[in-house]
Image (cartoon, helix red, strand yellow):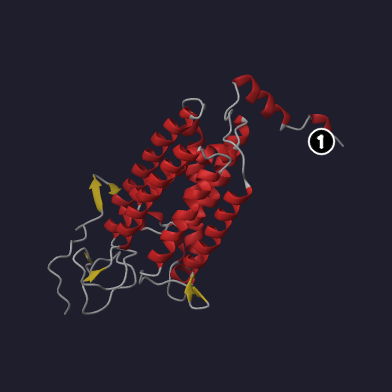
Amino acid sequence: MQVNLASFPSPSQGVWHLGPVPIRAYALCIIAGVVAAVVLGERRWQARGGRKGTVTDVAALAVPFGLVGGRLYHVITSPQLYFASGRHPIEALYVWKGGLGIPGALLLGGVGAWIACRRRGIPLPAFADAVAPGIAIAQAVGRFGNYFNQELFGRATTLPWAVRIDPKDPQANTGYLEGHSTYHPTFLYESLWNLGVAGVVIWADRRFKLGRGRAFALYVALYAVGRAWIELLRADQANHILGVRVNVWTSVLAFVCAVAWIGTHRGPREEVVEPRDEEAASTAATDVPSTSEHTT
């Protein structure tokens, strides 16, 4: 039996009950991350010339889209967890048990942000640049939900910062090895990496006055690099393509696309990021077809 006295323990529980209402640590971490992202995003958006409250309003649509996208990505890339023989498909809806894929959350969350920004006449790349560091921080905070759920840990290790996993925990993810109790805390690795990504993006944005989506692309590229090497440390069940985990391939694709964006979108930072109320109303009006166009 592996013994590692220098490791740190997993939380004894991830759910508390307030009467009949369950309070889940996973959900609290997601909420705390969203709040942090919105607060930082509001500050950066106003510093770029945007109006107060815009980030909050856009997030009201982007966050639900992101949650749905994150869950869809997880279920699509790991269907055997829900639709294989002996599994329960209804559990694909059990978001509180963990299982949100960041790539899907970013993709569908971006669609929600695009819809909200279009209604206001805001260029999505400028908005994405403002909120990019906040998204990285949200991911850093949200990863602690995996810690409370004792899931998505890495391979067995005796390093002094290893995390202890309780094999009796009903929510423990695949990857537990008989005779081993301590593992790479990949949730912590990704959390610290994301904090570093946020710091680098903020610094680069100030230093080089990034605009036209380049700050967001930098965030995506840096996150993809970190996610790739952390993914290779994970031991939970995952599907593979050519012997490599699907999320690694996704990270490679995201990195290539982000670097291509940075290289092809030159020019100075946008001077006007949000139109005045009357300008936004005019833009929205032009997006609505007249009644005569639908008359047959």
Quadrant of the rendering where the N terminus is positioned: bottom left
174 displayed left or right of 253:
left
Counting the numbered discs, the total is: 1
27 displayed left or right of 168:
right
Give the answer, above or below, for where 280 lies relative to 247: above
Which one is nearer the viewer's eye here, 256 or 104? 256
Quadrant of the rendering where the C terminus is positioned: top right
Question: Image quarter for residue 33?
Answer: top left
Q: Residue furthest left?
A: 5
For the point 63% across and 25% down, which residue is it? 280
Q: Residue furthest front?
A: 207
Q: Residue furthest top?
A: 278
- In terms of secondary structure, where does tag 1 sit? helix
Q: What is the crowding at mark 1: few (fewer than 14 residues within 10 Å), some, or many (at least 20)? A: few
Q: Position of residue 89 (x, y in %)?
A: 47, 65
Which one is nearer the viewer's eye here, 62 or 227? 227
Q: Position of residue 137 (x, y in %)?
A: 37, 45
166 displayed left or right of 34:
left
Q: Amino acid at mark 1?
A: His
Q: Position of residue 87 (x, y in %)?
A: 43, 71
Give the answer, above or below, for where 182 lies relative to 61: below
Give the answer, above or below, for where 241 lies relative to 31: below
- Residue 28 visible in this rendered orientation of the protein: yes
Which one is nearer the viewer's eye here, 269 or 9? 269
Q: Position of residue 250 (x, y in %)?
A: 52, 63
Q: Residue furthest right?
A: 296
For the point 50% across and 56% down, which residue is it? 103
| Residue with the mark numbered 1 | 294
- Residue 91 visible in this rendered orientation of the protein: no
